[in-house]
Amino acid sequence: MADFIEPRTLKGFRDYPPELMIPRERLLEKAREVYRSYGYAPIDTPALEYAEILVGKMSEEAEITRQLYRFTDNGGRDVALRFDLTVPFARFAAQHIGKLGTPFKRYHMGPVWRGETPQAGRFREFWQCDFDTIGTESNASDIETALVIHDLMRALGFERFEVRINNRLILNGLLEELGLAEKGAALLRALDKLPKVGRDAVIAEMTEKAGATAGQAERVLALAGMTGTNAEILDRLGREFGGNARAAEGVKRLRELTDVARVAGVPEERLRLDLSIARGLDYYTGTIYETFLLDLPKIGSVCSGGRYDNLAALYTKQRLPGVGASLGLDRLLAAMEELKLLPKTATPAPVLVVQFSPERLGEYQRMARQLRAEGIGVEVYPEAKKVGQQFKYAEQRGFRVALTAGPDEFAQGVWKVKDLARREETTVPAAGVLNAVRKLLVG
Amino acid sequence: MADFIEPRTLKGFRDYPPELMIPRERLLEKAREVYRSYGYAPIDTPALEYAEILVGKMSEEAEITRQLYRFTDNGGRDVALRFDLTVPFARFAAQHIGKLGTPFKRYHMGPVWRGETPQAGRFREFWQCDFDTIGTESNASDIETALVIHDLMRALGFERFEVRINNRLILNGLLEELGLAEKGAALLRALDKLPKVGRDAVIAEMTEKAGATAGQAERVLALAGMTGTNAEILDRLGREFGGNARAAEGVKRLRELTDVARVAGVPEERLRLDLSIARGLDYYTGTIYETFLLDLPKIGSVCSGGRYDNLAALYTKQRLPGVGASLGLDRLLAAMEELKLLPKTATPAPVLVVQFSPERLGEYQRMARQLRAEGIGVEVYPEAKKVGQQFKYAEQRGFRVALTAGPDEFAQGVWKVKDLARREETTVPAAGVLNAVRKLLVG
């Protein structure tokens, strides 16, 4: 190998061969379809930004700052690769919102880079897939965000999932009543660990680090631990928090959300109020969302987000409240693989035309083009190898149907249509190939 | 603004707001659809690679090397952002081909980065969109490449275009006969300038820089200037170059290409033999392709490529011959805009549901979800603003249909359906909204 440059990828980076890329493309396509169907428009921003834009007010020692791919470009500029899509969106909004107008709904899909210590399932380059509505405080957008998440999960083929929904205003209202408003962030961080560390450890953190009394911690945990149907939870919240304006607003928004979703046709069991979800980020100020697969709860939330007060405060004085969520692409792909929702294939075309007689290549491509025009992907094998080798190739790559015609078939105007999984071959007239293939692909 | 970080993009980089991103997504989608329909599978590679992989055997002073975004990462590695998709594909193939097997057909779409001096229409970050078949020398793949380009242009909505095709072997055969085989690269570079600088300048360059005699330069130009139908050109080539094995192989391949394409159903006027195209790169060794829009020839080739002898010689001893082409995304988008093939819109959803009565949000979203389930994108306006304002928003964003229902309509079970371009509104029963909307969107 001394004469060659060793072909290798950087640590923490990976190639996507077809068997990984086909599912990723399919997932992104479904997401695009659902986002668009709700009127979210696509945007893109550069991979590279001025480092000051990305660092913002974070300290140079913050973890995310240390993980930046940051360098000085040929023109002497301090630049970095984006580490998420939210900061570029904030910069983008500050720069263009005057022309775009509000409300503005966008989705954005693309790679981001973080120089994290690589570990199982974590990469230094990974895709994010966000959607947001900015420029409005209307609860209609909070509600729509829940509907989008629901329809997205359905479009990806999931049936058994829950979008868990909470509203920060309720907990904030309680903290206000308890005189703990200032301690909100620390209490939320503690509460967020509930599923991982359990009740006692959370109380310990709340009393030791966040300065709450044991009684106050109990009240917070009682709120978070509230169970029941959506209607039961809303009733209890209404009774307990009717007196606090902030909490009452949160309860009203949640009630409206469940009402609208029901009328709009979303099954109640898929949108569940869950007062325990807190989402550690200080960033969210209203409705918050997490999404769990009932068959794989341990994988964590596969789509999370929430409402925030102001997107782009670092870059503009225009206040831009918004609400949105982000699809956990890699988690979802892992889950879909585990739940066998991903077809195992290395070809995007299900049909292979065997090259039996090279002088008939025109006819092979003509048949292929006829099927392609009907939306069926068809590869014509490029070489006139032995038929057995071509069938072997077809099976290895995951083709489902093989079409063969040699001199005898052309003389009779027929094709052989082979179901590769069942290894069954039938002979059909040329004009019947489309229907025969369709039947095999549907069945 | 002193308190804010100025929101700006780096010189030579740009944001894609919806009116730019919607067409780009549409174009990429059509390309994906066509590539897949022929069995090309998607792959992706990291944006960042070891610099030694990207630089290869290029000198540190080469233009492309100087344009690299290259830096030392936190781990002390010499890394760079990819400047095209071909070099990463070569590295990818060297690394994975044993597992992938041959023939291997892939497409790859993604951003690449070059620190060029920014000028009109040129950016430091731009997308490439390549497809290739590697691991076979079969002419079937050369032919298929032409069919893919043809079907791609049709899928993008173009009718008046020509895929111009040549084969390097013919010119190489002539040069061999003239004893100029060693001067091939320099002569090709001169010939490639023919459309720009004209005949005399090309002859001057050939005699002065490439060491040909005037007579030899005339022979080369006579070949390049051959005109006629594909059949006429093939006849003349057959007569003139039958004696040279290399050229004869080139002629045979071109003949087979036009024969197969005709039988496969591609109109002859769309695949034209053109002996003048040379594609300056030394890289190509066989069939070469350029694609011109008959209504915008000056924009240059919008899809170009060719056959090469060995993709990954820098990284592996396994010889990987191949053939492929690359879509000129930015040129195509500019052309489609000029030819009005791009709908002017900032929304991916054609239908807006006006929020007339906020307490009816559930019904608005229910109707919207019914249309979405039929593949029609529908946005529900998030705020209960004045109807006039909502209509204005709909027109500005490029919505085509607005649906309105207030207390009167709900009482009667009807909706108002408004054609926003014609400003015509009709009232239809709720059950008839889908059909009414469909009619307006088709018409």
Image (tube, coloured by chain):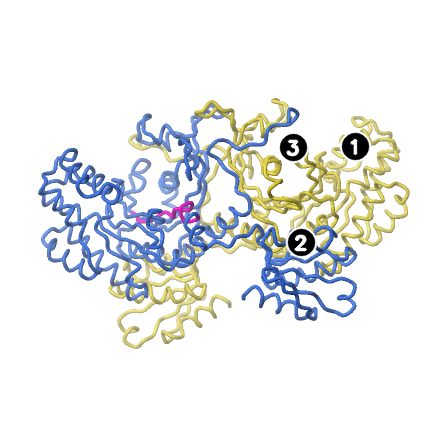
Chain colours: A blue, B yellow
| Residue A325 part of the magenta-drawn span | yes
- Amino acid type at circle 1 is Gly
The residue drawn where x is 76% and y is 31% is: B185
Sequence-first disc among 3 and 1 = 1
Rounded to the nearest angstrom, the CA distance separating label 2 from label 3 is: 33 Å
- Give the left or right position of residue B367, taking residue B277 as reference: left
List x then y, in percent, for residue B256: 79, 52
- Crowding at mark 3 (Cα within 10 Å: few <14, some 14-19, many 20+): many
- Give the left or right position of residue B218, taking residue A382 as reference: right
Which residue does the numbered mark 3 point to in the structure image? Answer: B316
Q: Is residue B301 among what the camera can see?
A: no
- Give the left or right position of residue B385, taking residue B220 as reference: left
The residue drawn where x is 84% and y is 50% is: B234
Q: State which chain disc 2 sits on.
A: B
1 and 2 marks in contact (CB < 8 Å)? no
- Crowding at mark 2 (Cα within 10 Å: few <14, some 14-19, many 20+): many
Foreground tag (2 vs 3) = 3
- Amino acid type at circle 2 is His
For the residues beneath circles 1 and 2, the answer to whether they share a chain is: yes
Which residue does the numbered mark 1 point to in the structure image? Answer: B184
Which residue does the numbered mark 2 point to in the structure image? Answer: B150
For the residues beneath circles 2 and 3, the answer to whether they share a chain is: yes
List x then y, in percent, for residue A153: 38, 56
Rounded to the nearest angstrom, the CA distance separating label 1 from label 2 is: 30 Å
Foreground tag (3 vs 1) = 3
User: Is residue B73 or residue B154 the one in the foreground?
Assistant: B73
Q: State which chain disc 3 sits on.
A: B
